[in-house]
């Protein structure tokens, strides 16, 4: 824990680590980032192991990309050294067995490109983002007061708002330490070199592009980074004059009404909520897949005035090394807190047996079902010995009375198809 501060939370790599359970968050991210290194190493090895006749251009692409993956591992280890990655001695197979998802499915690859957009090639997009917020506020970003940028990602918008405005304090939060540690270096005026891996490379050399990331100038005094979970914000009620949510409300994983109520609590009376980004709730429950009309109707119960709204179509992730980019129709609004939310947002309820390591873990119906599923899964995997065919495996299932002869072969095929498809998905960075 941090001996230099009185908060009882650690400061890791110069960034306050304000998670509800700091040690658990550190262990989770350490494991995910170690798993990413293992994944990159295995992919590089697979590229180098390709044999047989191939085009010279293919040979060059495989060799250069494998070298980039290996170099990226070392660059990540240096950047993320404060996490103590050497302590995460768990093999990839063990991580999978424990249910740890690949970090490329936990935001590291989804938002990793934001680093390059924010600090390498995205001047047009960055200026457009700042312009949308300025447009809401009469053409400037002055007078924001104490400002919180939730889900700040690679932090360019927070940097630009603070640089162009007069806020005495801007706090940028995100839960992803890769983005936070990179931003720490950049805001301090230090450059960072990392590879960009475009979705649709234009040329062979674009499969892995070493970019130098840099801020136009060091961050203005008063811009602070905090690692935290937006679902459990570590700030006192009424701590901020302004809360900014960029590309946030539709991906946070909570119903919009609850998100709005949480933001209300963070604001002082009369405080301002500025939103910018997409409204794409497609992964939410059906009733929570809000459109703009539903968002606007939710404002009053959450304690906000009717917002001023802007919609605009902007370029999005137009990497010069990729053939893939798009236009995004963003929704921006500004509104003021006029009352407390009608309903207090529920806090996460964590069972006692998850908080105290010596408490017995209950055998819940969900755990019982998972145990049965895992036994079946393990039994099927044990049948794969390099010699049995699908028909042989189906015959064993019938003999063990696990399923009928009519369905066994089809179920084995489905099982193996899923395993194969998952392995193919994991093989792409």
Image (cartoon, rainbow, N blue to C red):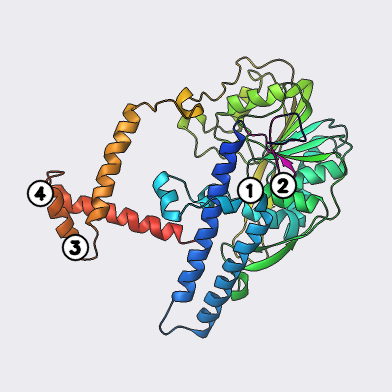
Query: Label 3 belongs to which residue?
Result: 389
Residue at image position (45%, 49%) is 95
Query: Label 2 belongs to which residue?
Result: 13
Secondary structure of the residue carrying tag 4 is helix
Disc 2 and disc 1 in contact, CB within 8 angstroms:
yes
Residue at image position (57%, 66%) is 69
Question: Does residue 258 show up?
Answer: yes
**N-terminal-most mark, 3 or 4:** 3
Question: Does residue 316 show up?
Answer: no
Disc 1 and disc 4 in contact, CB within 8 angstroms:
no
Secondary structure of the residue carrying tag 2 is loop
Residue at image position (64%, 55%) is 113
Query: Label 1 belongs to which residue?
Result: 83
**N-terminal-most mark, 2 or 3:** 2
Residue at image position (57%, 45%) is 29
Residues at marks 2 and 1, CA–CA distance in whole angstroms: 8 Å
Magenta residues (range): 8-19
Residues at marks 1 and 4, CA–CA distance in whole angstroms: 50 Å
Q: Which mark is residue 399?
A: 4
Name the foreground residue: 306 vs 94.
Answer: 94
Image label count: 4
**N-terminal-most mark, 2 or 4:** 2
Magenta span includes 12: yes
């Amino acid at each position: 824990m941090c001996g230099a501060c009185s908060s009882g939370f650690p400061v890791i790599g110069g960034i306050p680590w304000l998670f509800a359970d700091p040690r658990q968050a550190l262990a989770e991210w350490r494991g995910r980032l170690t798993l990413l290194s293992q994944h990159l190493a295995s992919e590089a090895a697979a590229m180098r192991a390709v044999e047989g006749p191939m085009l010279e251009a293919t040979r060059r692409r495989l060799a250069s990309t494998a070298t980039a993956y290996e170099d990226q591992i070392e660059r990540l280890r240096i950047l993320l050294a404060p996490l103590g990655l050497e302590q995460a001695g768990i093999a990839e197979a063990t991580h999978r067995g424990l249910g740890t998802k690949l970090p490329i499915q936990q935001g590291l690859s989804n938002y990793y490109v934001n680093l390059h957009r924010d600090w390498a090639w995205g001047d047009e997009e960055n200026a457009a983002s700042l312009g949308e917020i300025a447009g809401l506020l009469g053409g400037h970003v002055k007078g924001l007061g104490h400002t919180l940028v939730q889900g700040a990602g690679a932090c360019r918008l927070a940097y630009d708002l603070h640089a162009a405005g007069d806020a005495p304090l801007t706090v940028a939060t995100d839960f992803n330490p890769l983005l936070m540690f990179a931003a720490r270096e950049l805001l301090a005026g230090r450059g960072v070199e990392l590879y960009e891996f475009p979705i649709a490379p234009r040329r062979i050399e674009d499969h892995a592009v070493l970019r130098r990331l840099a801020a136009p100038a060091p961050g203005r005094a008063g811009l602070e980074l905090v690692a935290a979970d937006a679902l459990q914000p570590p700030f006192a009620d009424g701590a901020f004059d302004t809360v900014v949510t960029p590309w946030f409300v539709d991906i946070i994983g909570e119903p919009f009404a609850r998100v709005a109520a949480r933001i209300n609590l963070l604001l002082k009376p009369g405080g301002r909520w500025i939103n910018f980004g997409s409204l794409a709730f497609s992964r939410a429950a059906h009733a929570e897949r809000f459109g703009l009309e539903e968002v606007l109707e939710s404002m009053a119960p959450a304690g906000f005035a009717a917002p001023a709204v802007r919609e605009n179509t902007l370029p999005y992730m137009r990497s010069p090394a990729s053939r893939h980019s798009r236009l995004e129709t963003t929704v921006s609004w500004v509104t003021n807190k006029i009352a407390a939310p009608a309903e207090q947002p529920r806090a996460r309820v964590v069972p006692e047996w998850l908080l105290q390591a010596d408490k017995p873990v209950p055998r819940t119906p969900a755990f019982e079902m998972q145990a049965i599923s895992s036994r079946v899964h393990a039994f099927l995997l044990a049948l794969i010995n390099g010699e049995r065919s699908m028909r042989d495996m189906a015959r064993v299932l019938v003999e063990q009375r696990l399923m009928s002869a009519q369905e066994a072969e089809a179920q084995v095929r489905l099982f193996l198809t899923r395993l194969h498809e998952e392995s193919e998905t994991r093989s792409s960075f």
